[in-house]
Image: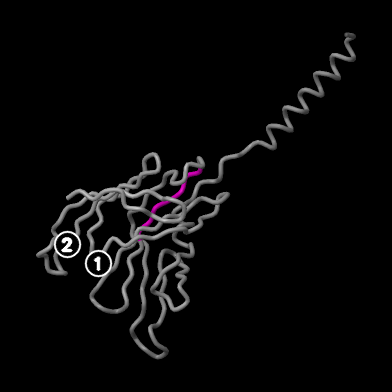
Amino acid sequence: MNRSRKARTLALALALLATAAACGNKPAAPLTLEMLKSTEYTSEWPADGVAELTDGTYREKIMEGSASEILIVMHPIYAIGDLNGDGAEDAIVVLVSSGGGSGSFYTLEAVLNQDGEPKHVASVSLGDRADLKSITVDAGTITVEMTTHGPNDPMCCPSLEVTQTYELQGETLVQLSSDA
């Protein structure tokens, strides 16, 4: 093979490698706290079933002219980790919702990383007035440590320490275990 042909072959091989690298799967950009605090979450609380958070908060008047409102806020404890095995870092957040009464209802929310954009896919209730301690994600398993109500606790004062594990199966958060 002459020198000119070797050079052309090498140039072609390099061009093919560069094209293959450009077409390869790039990891999705990570989700940020700011993104999670400005995401739409499906919720039973708003009239239209969707709470679009602004800086971690959603408000909606219960009735026109009423002082009472639905308030949904993102809890400061959240976790980042791959929930669906696609290699992208997803998120688990907790929303705390109230409708003007004394209850504060906690929900665990699964947010997938869809090409660098947050997509809320699943929720599960953690109960009323829970005291959240931590959330972790490890190999798709979500672990929640919290204090919740024991069988004889008044609503004001949860005392039962629990560790619950969940897994995202399709678009459903499934509880795997609950240890007190």
The scheme the figure's colours follow is: one colour
Location of residue 86 with respect to 93 vertically, above or below: above
Farthest residue to the top: give it.
1
Secondary structure beneath dot 1 equals: strand
Tell me the chief SS of the magenta region: strand
For mark 1, what is the residue?
Answer: 128
Quarter holding residue 95: bottom left
Secondary structure beneath dot 2 equals: loop
Q: In this view, does 168 lie to the left or right of 178?
A: right
- Residues packed near mark 1 inside 10 Å, few (<14), some (14 to 19) or many (20 plus): many
- Residues packed near mark 2 inside 10 Å, few (<14), some (14 to 19) or many (20 plus): many
- Identity of the residue drawn at 90% across and 14% down: 4
First in sequence: mark 1 vs mark 2: 1
Farthest residue to the bottom: give it.
65
Q: What amino acid does circle 2 point to?
A: His
Residue 91 in magenta? Answer: yes
In this view, the residue in front, 147 or 73, is 147
Residues at marks 1 and 2 touching, judged by CB atoms closer than 8 Å:
yes
**Highlighted range, magenta:** 88-94
Q: What amino acid does circle 1 point to?
A: Asp
In this view, the residue in front, 46 or 152, is 152
- Identity of the residue drawn at 41% across and 69% down: 43
Structural distance between the alpha carbons of marks 1 and 2: 8 Å
Q: Which x, y percent locates residue 124?
A: 35, 60
- Identity of the residue drawn at 42% across and 89% down: 64
Tag shown at residue 152: none
| Quadrant of the drawing holding the N terminus | top right
Residue 169 in magenta? Answer: no
Q: Which x, y percent locates residue 154?
A: 12, 69
Q: Which x, y percent locates residue 86?
A: 51, 42
Q: In this view, does 165 lie to the left or right of 55?
A: left
For mark 2, what is the residue?
Answer: 149
